[in-house]
Image (cartoon, rainbow, N blue to C red):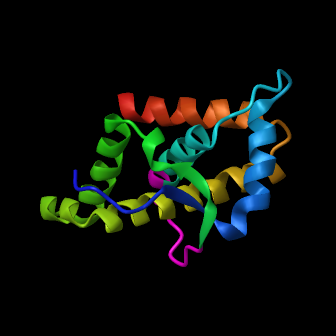
Amino acid sequence: MKKTTRTLLAFDERQLETISKLKVAFAGEDKQDISNKDLMMIAIGIGFSAKNKVSDFKRSNTGVRMEYFKPEDNALFAALQVNETNEASSLLEIEDLYNLAEKYAAGGIGILSEAFEKERDFHDWFHAYIYSSLTELNN
């Protein structure tokens, strides 16, 4: 992959308060913090699976530092880009690849936020969501 001048994949600045609430919700009763990276990856997955990306993304100064991403994470971002464009050559547009990941993450944060506000038990909802997604993949 080409190098980027970015220092981080950012969260949408309008979602920062929501992200704080979601991190507390994911921590649950055992109070084990979820990292920004883990939340970002969950949100990207949910945003992509729901085909929900934010088009008017507003980059914040909060997110995940680029050095925390492993090669397999970058492979996921590349898969999103190729799926979106149907062009392998689009992988040369590294900034577009990361912009797309941020937009799907923002879409996923929106879905998580809505579930957090509406569902009686966020953890049960999340487990059911993941289970149903995995079941769909296996069918």
Q: Position of residue 81 (x, y in %)?
A: 29, 59
Q: Residue at 60% across / 37% down in the picture?
A: 129
Looking at the rendered image, the quarter that the C terminus falls into is top left
Question: For residue 114, what is the image quadrant?
Answer: bottom right
Vertical comparison of 84 with 67: above or below: below
Is residue 113 depicted above or below 132 in this figure?
below
Depth check, front residue: 88 or 13: 13
> Magenta span has 57?
yes
Identity of the residue furthest to the bottom in this view: 56
32 or 68: nearer the viewer: 68
Taking the spot 52% from the left edge, 54% from the top edge, the residue there is 47
Residue 33, horizontal then vertical, whole percent: 74, 31
Residue 85 in view here: yes
Residue drawn at x 54%, y 34% as measured from the top left: 132
Q: State left or right for residue 64 relative to residue 15.
A: left
Image coords of residue 138 (percent x, y): 37, 28
Q: Is residue 53 left or right of residue 125?
A: left
Name the residue located 50 percent from the left edge and 75 percent from the top edge: 55
90 relative to 17 in the view: left or right: left
Magenta stretch: give its range.
Answer: 48-58
80 with respect to 23 (left or right): left
Prevailing secondary structure of the magenta residues: loop
User: Is residue 52 in view?
Assistant: no
In this rendering, the count of numbered labels is: 0
Look at the picture and state if 135 lies above or below 81: above
Q: Position of residue 11 (x, y in %)?
A: 60, 60
Q: Is residue 53 magenta?
A: yes
In-front residue for pair 50/58: 58
